[in-house]
Image (cartoon, coloured by chain):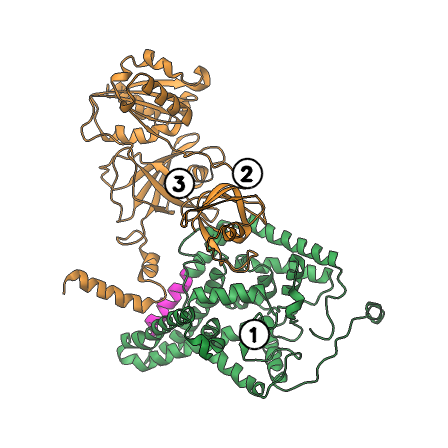
Chain colours: A green, B orange
Amino acid sequence: MTAIDPTAHLSAEQIEELGRELDAIRDEVIAARGEKDAAYIRKVISAQRKLELASRGILLFSFFPPAWIIGTAGLSVAKIMDNMEIGHNILHGQWDWMRDPKIHSTTWEWDHVSPSEQWKHSHNELHHTYTNVIGKDNDLGYGIMRVDEDQRWHPFHLGQPLWNFLNACFFEYGIAAYDLELGKNLHKRRRNNPEFRARARAVGRKIRKQVLKDYVIHPLLSGPSFLTTLAATFTANLVRNVWTHSVIMCGHFPEGVQVFERRSIKGETRGQWYLRQMMGSANISGSKAMHFMTGNLSHQIEHHLFPDLPSNRYAEVAVKVRALFEKYELDYVTGPLPKQVFSAWHKVFRLSLPNKKPKVKTPDREQELAAA
Amino acid sequence: MTSTALRSRAWKLMEMVTTPLLPSDYLDLVSPLRAGADLRGRIEAVHPETADAATLVIRPGRGWRGHTAGQYVRIGVDVDGVRLWRAYSLTSPTDRRDGRITITVKAIEDGKVSNHLVRRAVPGTLIHLDQPTGDFVLPQDTPAKVLYLTAGSGITPVMGMLRDTRFDDAVMVHCAPRPQDVIFRDELHDLAAGDKLRLTEVHTATDGILDIARLDALVPDWAERETWACGPAGLLDAAEKHWAEHGVPERLHTERFRAGVVATGDGGEVTFSATGKKADADGATPLLDIGEEAGVLMPSGCRMGICFGCVTPLKAGAVRDLRTGEITEAAPGVLIQTCVSAAAGPCDIER
């Protein structure tokens, strides 16, 4: 959809060969999955639970400022771990192979207002199948933003930096609304659809439980620290929301990431599907700690190619995937978090304004080679 | 308010504190064997019995209800990160003072779980347990004359009975390849030396497989004895035929360790057990498509194996992953992605 198709230099055979090479990478990891991987996720889950327990314990004394700071920081990290490295990845079925009914995509529930069942549908099924296809993948702008020059501009889009900021602060609610397809379903005729109502009730129940826990029960348990604990849980939720929103924005929004037209995926082959994932995702570079705190979504490209591989394997897979990008002369979009966040926000601002319709150029391979 | 009602209120409050997790998710971190927890056990010791058999001493969780001699227990063990469930006979007496239980495992060729337990299991490991079950047990009144006909690891449920009960007249015919392959050999010989058991060992490596007709010579009064037989299918089939031919089938009690081997091939008849529908499947069509064509409401999602929106329990049979060719056999708790799995023989999908 962008002016120049960055994959135009690949022949159909090359794209299928690329698909086979990616399949081989996947098979290799699957064959090697084992005890160490299982121990990894168990360790992360156990660490998350202990951290949350300890932080909530400390917050019982949150009227004492150092306790407030430590407890809030701990709870923020615990909530990020729950959503990212644990929840997101388990709900992808990355750990289903362990056959542990307690760590399974069909049974897991996360500390988030969107019920995992609904999130799995909108995220695993719609977003991951139709990655970056305008009109099919609503993750692109969550239905409230303009994300590509080709999309028609509307005065509503002038406000999109503000919408995006609010969405970041209350991200879990944004996701819940998005999983419910609230915008579409609030339409008069659809509001009374029993299936929608049942799903809305499920979200309502989940919100009630989460709110009761964070803003009533735990503050009450803190007694004299009621208000400070309330402030702490609010802050932890805010930190978690802004963090996850930032990480997720980096996955598909930075400059250089491609979006696709609906008709481009008709009859898509496995190789073409892989190629779309490669061109439609972006990574975040950084330390091991950074990868962990993003739930390894810093390896967004690898995650989109292989959404069901255990997250602790993405780092080693990334080396091989990157080599394929080089081999096939494709652009591997990556960068440190601040750069990627800036890039994504820059796009949000840029596209809030109208632009001229870009002309579609066919790349001239000869000319490109001569220039290079 | 009764104490039960009070406790359930308190538990509800606890659930509000821990949502979306359950209080037990936190309690499991510190006390996985407590009362009220999912039933688990901890391996406390592993004692080698023969070159390829070992006894595991297990401390069961507080919820363990106790067993009857001769029964088995299903245990769930994580092997290479994958939880696998197998059944093993309990070999400990029912009144063991320290409350521990034992199972005795023989490593079978290519047996993932048995080899793991015999050769790699380490004390301290947590395993998952079911309550004991099985009707390969003695009646309320111990029979006056008993015959045990066993082979290989078929000795294990019988050992549970021998350790638990005093017999007036018990005879055992046990088959194993060589003397050193006889599990519990020392203990059996001690029982024989103390006149508590009349023991005949058949060494199949030198004598060949036991011909059931030899029983007349080995145990002339076999037909008068209440008999418990456990071992390979061949031995049990022969025994059942022999007892029936002599008109005393009710005196024979058998225990088969392995259900029929799952036949894996290309395609087969698929049963959708929840709806009762059936359909023929080839080895290349995803079960999702087979089900939908048969008019079964199948959960579905991306249809390419990435979203896990179609996972469904596999109740019987085997399926093949169309991407990797890997075979998955039915077992409790096994779920398959129907969009990338094809029938590898007859199978049963819970839809």
The three-letter code of the residue at mark 2 reads Gly
Residue at numbered disc 1? A249
Mark 2, residue position: B265
- Please tell me which residue is depicted at 16% across the width and 61% down the height of the picture: B3
Which numbered marker is on residue B86? 3
- Please state which of residues A372 and A173 is positioned toward the viewer in this rendering: A173
Indicate which disc, 2 or 3, sits on the residue closer to the N terminus: 3
User: Under tag 3, what secondary structure?
Assistant: strand
Q: Is A217 placed left or right of A365 in the picture?
A: left
Amino acid, disc 3: Arg
The kind of secondary structure the magenta stretch mainly shows is helix
Q: Name the image quarter holding the N terminus of chain B.
A: bottom left
Residue B139 visible in image:
yes
Residue B60: quadrant of the picture:
top left
- x and y percentages locating residue A241 in the rendered image: 47, 75
Q: CA distance from mark 2 to mark 3?
A: 24 Å
What kind of residue is marked 1?
Met
Circle 2/circle 3 CB separation < 8 Å: no
Label 3 crowd (10 A; few <14 / some 14-19 / many >=20): some
Mark 1 or 2: in front is 2
Q: Chain of mark 2?
A: B
Stretch in magenta: A46-61
Residue at (75% x, 66% y) in the render:
A8
Viewer-nearest residue: B347 or B53: B347
Q: Would you say residue A295 is visible in this rendering? A: no
* Letter of the chain that mark 1 sits on in the rendering: A
Residue at x-position 51% and y-position 75%: A245
